[in-house]
Amino acid sequence: MSLSVSRHLAAVTAFAVAGLLASTAPAALAAPTAVTAAPVPPDIPLANVKAHLTQFSTIAAANGGNRAHGRPGYKASIDYVKGKLDAAGFTTTLQTFTTSGATGYNLIADWPGGDPNVVLMSGAHLDSVTSGAGINDNASGSAAVLEAALAVSRAGLQPTKHLRFGWWGAEELGLVGSRYYVNNLPAAERAKFSGYLNFDMIGSPNPGYFVYDDDPTIEQTFKNYYAGLGVPTEIETEGDGRSDHAPFKNVGIPVGGLFSGADYLKTAAQAQKWGGTSGQAFDRCYHSACDSLANINDTALDRNADAIAYAIWNLGASTPVPPGPSFENTADVNIPDSPGAAANSPVTVAGVVGNAPATTKVDVNIVHTYRGDVQLDLIAPDGTAYRLKNSSGTDSADNIVASYTVNASSEPANGIWKLQAKDVASADTGYINSWKITF
């Protein structure tokens, strides 16, 4: 990740505190409708991603200890990636540019097929700083994007959109390679992009789970993946404008991506949420010689690599419906530790034409010490209850961070909807942190 662009300060969102609301007796229960993407995104093998990291480490060791722009380690890195993609059936292009008195290289790889007028691109910068091998920054993103591309080949994927992948040079000198690529795209080619996905530092040793918030559809895609894991995310602010998505964003191309943190310090709240060490940098070896193979958190790398494939399959291999209007309640509502008592968090919906859709989406964030005790229902304005989650005495984990889809097409959209939570057993406590309904 480049230091050449000014950082943006992280915004802190304060949540209001609401009192406990009265219980509402639900009417007949309606089962949620399961929605799955087709084709199913693959699991990206962590071992494969780490094998690429080992190759980048070996390349650095054989070439003065780094893979920086203008150094032989960078060219050897890009030759390694190109060889893998050529063998997998991609059409590759090596784009050259000059900066700081040396030749730089971008590698572009196109997967055959898909609508040539609708391009989804995924990318990462391949260069390191001169002080080290740059294994987290950014062999991690480069290796994961490479393995996702190889997964496309292994699956013989026939995407709806045209899939393109990029590995950028001289990012550490100020986003030079990606800016050169974007600036040399004719206007007609820029207009074909449905999105650019960027992955810079995704295996930080003291990781956070940060999602770019630049485009709502791309952002929600990554949030959906992490909600499925029960892992909360935060909006990415540390690297805003400092990585290769910026040139794309600056010309109006929708962008998104993932980040696990650089030299900002993990807060106590973040350590409680994600584990790791509070008061310590997400990556203590950022831009240092110790950014080696030992500087990777395998869990973060594995999750983020799988999230890349999830996004490519959902955004590129299918045609997702853009999200409709959303309504959210971020006020905390305590869940009574009393079997049968209910907590209700209301949302007033107005201005939506007609009934709710058959794919009404409910995003839930509940803090609780034993989620197996918690039963969740969506209560429609007429009192009809749509079961989101049953209680389960065997689910001993904490917290509920999840997305549910219900068929509420018989309900007028406008009115007061409620998320209702019941704690069916005693001895554990929690509260509704926030929830959102999307039509």
Image: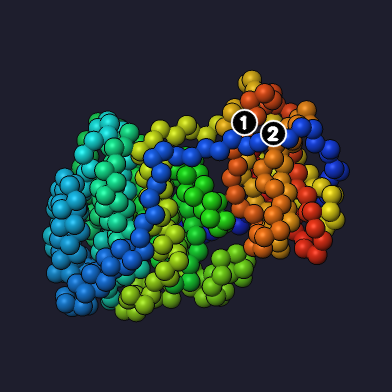
Task: Please rate how many residues cluster around mark 1, counting C-alpha atoms within 10 Å: few if below 14, some from 14 to 19, many from 20.
Answer: some
Res 288 → quadrant: bottom left
Residue bearing the label numbered 2: 30
Q: Position of residue 352 (x, y in %)?
A: 63, 25
Element assignment for label 2: strand
Residue 387 in the image: above or below residue 402: above
Element assignment for label 1: loop
Q: Position of residue 273 (x, y in %)?
A: 60, 64
Residue 326, visible in the rendered structure: no
Name the residue at the top extreme: 354
Q: Are marks 2 and 1 in contact (CB under 8 Å)?
A: yes
How far apart are the two marked residues, 2 and 1, measured between alpha carbons?
8 Å
Q: Give the side of residue 272 with respect to residue 241, left or right.
A: right
Residue 307 in the image: above or below residue 370: above
Which quarter of the figure is the C terminus placed in?
Answer: top right
Q: What amino acid type should be assigned to the residue bearing mark 1? A: Asn
Please tell me the numbered disc located at residue 425. Answer: none
Which quarter of the figure is the N terminus placed in?
Answer: bottom left
Query: Which mark is nearer the camera, 2 or 1?
Result: 2
